[in-house]
Image (spheres, rainbow, N blue to C red):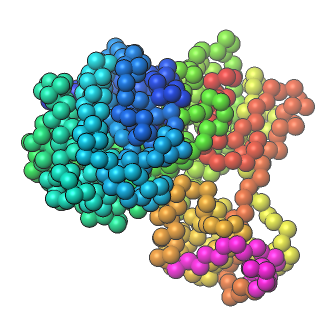
Amino acid sequence: MNFSKSLSPIKIGAVELKNRYIVPAMGSHLGEPDGQVSQRTIDYYVARAKGGYGLIVTEFTCVDPVGMALPGQLGIWDDSFIEGHKRLTQEVHKNGGVIFSQLHHAGRLSYSMVTGTQPVAPSSIASPVNKEIPRELSTEEVYQLIEKYVNAAVRAKEAGYDGVELHGAHQYMIAQFMSPYSNKRLDEFGGHFHNRMRFPTEIVKGIKEKCGKDFPVSVRISAEESEHDSWGVRQARKAAKMLEEAGADVISVSIGGAYGTTYKTLAPQALPPGFNASNSAFIKEVLNIPVIITGRIVDPYVAEDIISSGSADLVSLGRPSLADPEFPNKVKENRIDEIIPCVACLQRCSEAGGRDEWDTGVSCTYNPFTGKEGIMKFNPPEVKKKIAIIGAGPAGLETAWVAAKRGHSVTVFDKANVPGGQIALGARPPYKQELLKAVQTYMRLGKKYGVTYNFGVEANLETVKDFDEVVLATGGEPICPPFDGIEEAGAVQAIDVLAGKVVPGDRVIIIGGGQVGAETGEMLANQNRRVTIVEMKDAIAEEEHQDVRFLLIERLKKYGVNMLTKTKVKALSKDSVVVEREGAEERLSGFDTIVLAVGVKSYNPLEEIMKEAGKKTHVIGDANKPGDITDAIYAGAKLGLSI
């Protein structure tokens, strides 16, 4: 396919971009605790400049300490921040990048525990997120806040930014003024639509006056914000037109708010790629300036279609830019199958804790180098070795291509006939199919760097006798709990159901409502089976990201899946399960199949054998300690760099 539209240049105001791929504002959380730009911040953005993105927009940068959303958020509210931002812009420019600073104030979405003071807002209406009652800004304070945005833009220009973006989406301060849901004012900043738009349009006019007409201003807005709000795409279209008339050079169309519709802002796999494009097309109809679109644009084919169809002029590759900072270069060089994919899992890019002292700030499950660009480097080894990796699951595949890229000779063995391990099975339920992209990419990268793959081979000591070091990435095996009657019941493992080794009956009970149990339940319900899920904990699939989980639970309800939480299994029989609920025993009966999904334990039969034979051996992933896929891939990357 020809990607000529995506790779073509375009102007935003007086600034020309080399292509239509945008790194939108996303919190990197890599700055210093006091909000200053850190070296890790610079490394992160420079990697994306090198990767060929047409425009980079920094994470939200606060114009007033009262408006901070998070501790350590980047600041630009006084001149002390200019020097750090200047270092950032200089490095981005050296590497061929164009960079805007996104100006932000959280308004009622700030927290007093972060700022040390009561949040401020257009009106004293609590946010459903933090539930704090904000203090309503006086009319004079509103004008002062407009000046704070304008002065922040002046600092951004002095620091070398090529333009600025106003964060008017996701129910932050500018959006709070625009929305009738959060703006109940009776002065010139409230009531009528044109009054509610006065706050953002005055900011745009002020920036143009002080920074010059050739200094571009982008405004990010949401096409939809909240299920509880009257703000929708038609209001967004009117707002975009008024912002253009005020002097805005580009409109960036996002979607979702800070509540109710966050699953659209951080869209999981359940939302189709490019789902927001119809909104951007509707808004673009009335504009003469370019439009940027956001909304799960995860591969170059969707991006090209959106631009070619006229739905938008530029595409935001948010999480895809986390997954692969080289996305544009790989498209340009026709290396599509080498793009590390964003599979919209939300497991590490959003609200996920790090795994060690290196792994802080933003990162990606499938590309753990993100956020650690200056720390995790592909340095050649002192001695090139022959490395045997046993297991072609996520940990083994990651270790293989990373070690091979550094210069080692790597061979992978797996007793299965296909790669992927748990990823391959995890892709079986609905809305999980994109996980397979990661397997294919790791295989492609491995082959590029010379990895040899041997499938259908159950490796042993003899198999690896000629290798210098051995990596055991043999994964885990499902736990079989010691329930009374488990043999009589003929219980089967969820992993065998997912693999198609077991065909369940029409009435199925799943013991264990974690991620595996819940997703197996959805797959079976999707096949018109009647499903009951039993879980000891308070919630089903509680380890999932909240937005992934929200949509999963909604689908399970739609299918009529019976979800029993706070329910402990006591015993099994051929067609029934005895459980304890609210202190009383109860028999659940009438089931054709009982499925177990109670977790995994390490499967590692070779470690002692290898060590007794004197082989230098590394054990990673579930073979070392059961964890999630993020743990496995990160461990593989670290081992691949250090071996």
Question: In the rendered structure, does residue 293 fall within the stretch colored magenta?
Answer: no
Does residue 122 sit above or below 180 in this rendering?
Answer: above
Does residue 88 sit above or below 400 in this rendering?
Answer: above
Which residue extends farthest top? Answer: 382
Question: In the rendered structure, does residue 580 fall within the stretch colored magenta?
Answer: yes
Q: Position of residue 57 (x, y in %)?
A: 33, 32
Does residue 487 sit above or below 495 in this rendering?
Answer: below
Nearest to the observer: residue 461 or residue 142: 142
**What is the quadrant of the C terminus in the image?**
top right
Q: Is residue 103 left or right of residue 43?
A: left
Is residue 296 at least partly visible in the picture? Answer: no
Tell me the magenta residue range.
560-586
Residue beneath the point at 52% across and 72% down: 556
Q: Position of residue 630 (x, y in %)?
A: 60, 43
Does residue 520 sit above or below 586 in this rendering?
Answer: above
Q: Main secondary structure of the magenta part?
A: strand
The quadrant holding residue 21 is top left
**What is the quadrant of the N terminus in the image?**
top left
Nearest to the observer: residue 493 or residue 212: 212
Q: Position of residue 333 (x, y in %)?
A: 33, 27
Nearest to the observer: residue 70 or residue 296: 70
Q: Position of residue 472 (x, y in %)?
A: 74, 37
Nearest to the observer: residue 630 or residue 423: 630
Residue beneath the point at 66% across and 33% down: 356
The quadrant holding residue 317 is top left
Q: Is residue 108 left or right of residue 446?
A: left
